[in-house]
């Protein structure tokens, strides 16, 4: 999570404006985050050999600063500390200072975040870690104010103390760092698993834990700050449908309602912010992340399928519109994020004063919008990190649902006027790097949006995105998938998440269209993923290939975070590929990985909700749907729409063409030209082209309620 500091941080008296005539090494980088710091007086290095060699040669500790370009508190620390000439002199004289974009190197970020969380009890960005010259951590934290403040040590003080300690007691520091590294390696070693641990009995206690943590008033789980946590919600929804637990389903739908009513959701432009600083979802931390919106889009599509409630489809459409309008490269790739700040103020782009709204709307629409959005003269938002905050700002949220048909029409007119007016404001910074992993998540969501909602423009966007990734980050000759592309260049980083998420994205597009080329690409990347990341001895996938040589530890995922773990999606994708192709290697790797995580799923199931949901389908009898006919034939598309209209997360859909198994291909010759075969386990129902019958076959069969004895 981003740092959630909420105290007021006055600017240092030493703050100085950026000198744009001076640049440091970061000017040569592609990361928008690193480029934001290219004018700092700090002698920054990117992560790499040059910095490591300087630290070794000059026996200097490393100061590692990790953040991302749309991180509000990263901007605050830059303003207070990294543009401060005196702090820069301390850093330049006594440390090798390295900047890392956590979105480009999540593998690095996780290692050092583990250390910070273990040593301080909390984490966040910007992350500030001090390392020995061989990159072993010995002290760290998140945001530091420039000067001592409210009991928190100031960054200037921290630098001075660490320099003194390194100079006078270096051997102690080295010994401590060595012990810390051993502890991190032990933390990284998963608990041995036993096959008997993996059973459907893990599902009920996981759902029970979620019900206990559920907020019945505002939805979601826990207290402020409150995160959407779509993985937990998708698991609970699938559990509720599988075991006919209406209470579980209602918890998910209520949460979807409350989030969409709050300021977390952009009431004018669509899309969701990162999290809410309050439990009501009213006041967000305004940054918008591609991965959050991809996962939430999938959640709202599921909610629409499970409930039939048109409001969820409307939210989903607005999210797609937001991504295609504001977050899409002209060639089809999806950008990474939008900042919380604009004009140097958090939320300024999104918030309204009464006067601003009155100046835009006719009187009747203004009074309606004021009531609907609960606008007040005093406002409901103050940026406490700003030494000179603006007052009277309102975060728009839904406060009045009792609108007549005429008022609904007037409200839509008011929203359109407000959106057009807002579009003329100075926009927040957009991080325009294209990350393969996050694009894979949005590709899945866009493909599902097409499958569920039937809008051809969504299919076009998904296919353009996959073509972009195939062209710019996939090297077919070496079967290598790279993690980041920006400004005409890709990096050299390979990550499990990139491979797994893109395999799943290509698979979801295949299942929505039955175009065999999408399945073929998924198979190629899956083969490369198995070759580079799979641990055939113990099971599970490493986060990085063995050839990655700049990490002090090689990790396997231990949890689903804000994004799914690479292992969670790899298992899901491989089980689907095994269903489609009947190639035993895919099923074997997926099942061995499930067993590898058996102890974790047993003891802390909610740490891996995406893997838990996949395990739920693996335990049960999921649907395998074979659709005959040419992929683009109207009759085939009609059957596909019916298949995807039913909430059935435990399904695999395949056609006749391409690398499907022989049994599926044989059905074309034996049965009707256009039909669907719904199979559960090894038994297939007779083919049908009857839409109501097909929807009935796709629905969940009644399951016995799980009891404590199971």
Image: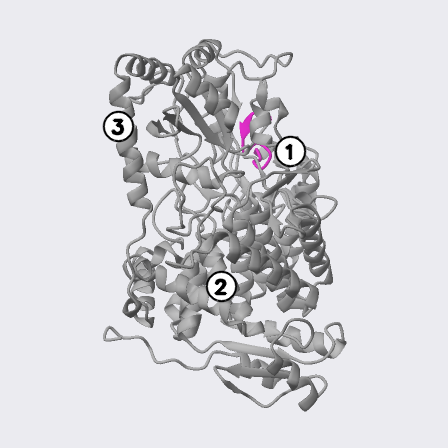
Left or right, 316 with respect to 200, comes to right
Badge number at residue 427: 1
Q: What's the CA distance linking mark 3 and mark 1?
A: 46 Å
Badge number at residue 145: none
For the N terminus, the quadrant is: top left
Dot 3 corresponds to which residue?
Answer: 176
Other-residue count near label 1 (Cα within 10 Å), few / some / many at <14 / 14–19 / ≥20: some
For the C terminus, the quadrant is: bottom left
Q: Say what secondary structure mark 3 lies in.
A: helix
Other-residue count near label 3 (Cα within 10 Å), few / some / many at <14 / 14–19 / ≥20: some
Badge number at residue 572: 2
Other-residue count near label 2 (Cα within 10 Å), few / some / many at <14 / 14–19 / ≥20: many
Left or right, 185 with respect to 438, comes to left
**Any magenta on residue 345?**
yes
Q: Say what secondary structure mark 1 lies in.
A: loop
Near-viewer residue (98 or 228): 98
Q: Earlier in the sequence, mark 3 or mark 1?
A: 3
Location of residue 228 in the rendering, given as x and y in whole percent from the top left corner: 45, 50
Q: Are marks 3 and 2 in contact (CB under 8 Å)?
A: no
Q: Earlier in the sequence, mark 1 or mark 2?
A: 1
Q: Earlier in the sequence, mark 3 or mark 2?
A: 3
Segment colored magenta: 343-353
């Amino acid at each position: 999570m981003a740092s959630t500091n909420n105290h007021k941080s006055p600017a240092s008296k030493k703050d100085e404006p950026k000198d744009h005539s001076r640049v440091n090494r970061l000017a040569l980088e592609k990361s928008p985050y690193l480029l934001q710091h290219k004018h700092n007086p700090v002698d920054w290095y990117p992560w790499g050999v040059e910095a490591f060699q300087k630290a070794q040669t000059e026996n200097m500790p490393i100061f590692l600063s990790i953040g991302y370009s749309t991180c509000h508190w990263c901007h605050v620390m830059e303003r207070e500390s990294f543009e401060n000439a005196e702090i820069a002199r301390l850093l330049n004289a006594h440390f090798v200072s390295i900047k890392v974009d956590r979105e480009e190197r999540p593998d690095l970020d996780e290692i050092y975040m583990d250390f910070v969380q273990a040593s301080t009890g909390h984490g966040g960005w910007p992350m500030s870690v001090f390392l020995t010259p061989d990159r072993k951590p010995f002290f760290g934290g998140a945001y530091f104010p420039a000067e001592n403040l409210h009991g928190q040590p100031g960054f200037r003080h921290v630098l001075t103390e660490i320099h003194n300690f390194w100079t006078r007691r270096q051997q102690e520091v080295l010994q401590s760092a060595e012990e810390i590294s051993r502890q991190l390696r032990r933390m990284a070693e998963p608990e041995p698993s036993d096959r008997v641990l993996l059973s459907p009995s893990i599902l009920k206690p996981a759902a029970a834990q979620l019900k206990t943590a559920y907020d019945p008033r505002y939805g979601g789980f826990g207290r402020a700050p409150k995160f959407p946590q779509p993985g937990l919600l998708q698991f609970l929804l699938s559990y509720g449908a599988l075991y006919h637990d209406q209470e579980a389903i209602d918890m998910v739908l209520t949460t979807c309602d409350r989030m969409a009513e709050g300021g977390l959701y952009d009431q004018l432009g669509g899309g969701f912010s990162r999290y809410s600083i309050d439990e009501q979802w009213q006041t967000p931390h305004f940054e918008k992340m591609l991965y959050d919106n991809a996962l939430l889009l999938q959640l709202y599509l599921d909610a629409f399928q499970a409930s039939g409630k048109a409001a969820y489809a409307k939210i989903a459409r607005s999210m797609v519109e937001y991504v295609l309008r504001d977050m899409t490269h002209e060639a089809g790739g999806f950008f990474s994020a939008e900042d919380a700040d604009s004009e140097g103020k958090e939320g300024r782009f999104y918030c309204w004063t009464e006067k601003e709204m009155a100046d835009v709307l006719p009187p009747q629409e203004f009074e309606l919008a004021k009531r609907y959005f609960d606008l007040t003269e005093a406002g409901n938002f103050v940026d406490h990190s700003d030494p000179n905050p603006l007052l009277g700002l309102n975060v728009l949220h839904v406060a009045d649902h009792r609108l007549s048909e005429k008022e609904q029409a007037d409200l839509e007119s008011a929203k359109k006027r407000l959106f057009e007016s807002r579009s003329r404001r100075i926009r927040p910074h957009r991080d325009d790097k294209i990350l393969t992993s996050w694009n894979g998540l949005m590709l899945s969501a866009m493909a599902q949006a097409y499958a569920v909602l039937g809008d051809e423009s969504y299919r076009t966007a998904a296919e353009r995105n996959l073509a972009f990734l195939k062209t710019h980050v996939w090297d077919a000759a070496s079967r290598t998938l790279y993690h980041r592309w920006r400004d005409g260049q890709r990096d050299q980083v390979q990550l499990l998440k990139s491979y797994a998420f893109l395999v799943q994205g290509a698979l979801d597009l295949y299942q929505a269209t039955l175009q065999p080329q999408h399945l073929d690409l998924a198979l190629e990347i899956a083969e490369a993923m198995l070759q580079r990341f799979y641990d055939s001895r113990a099971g599970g996938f490493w986060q990085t290939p063995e050839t990655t040589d700049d990490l002090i530890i090689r990790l396997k995922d231990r949890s689903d975070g804000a994004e799914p773990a690479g292992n969670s999606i790899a298992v899901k994708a491989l089980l689907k590929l095994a269903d489609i192709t009947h190639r035993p290697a895919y099923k074997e790797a997926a099942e061995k990985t499930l067993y590898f995580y058996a102890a974790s799923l047993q003891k802390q199931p909610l740490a891996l909700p995406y893997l838990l949901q996949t395990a739920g389908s693996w335990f049960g009898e999921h649907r395998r749907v074979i659709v005959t006919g040419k992929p683009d034939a109207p009759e085939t598309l009609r059957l596909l729409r019916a298949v995807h209209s039913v909430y059935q997360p435990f399904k695999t859909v395949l056609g006749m063409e391409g690398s499907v198994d022989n049994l599926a291909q044989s059905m074309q010759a034996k049965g009707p030209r256009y039909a669907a075969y719904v199979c559960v386990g090894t038994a297939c129902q007779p083919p049908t082209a009857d839409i109501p019958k097909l929807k009935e076959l796709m629905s969940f069969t009644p399951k016995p309620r799980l009891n404590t004895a199971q």
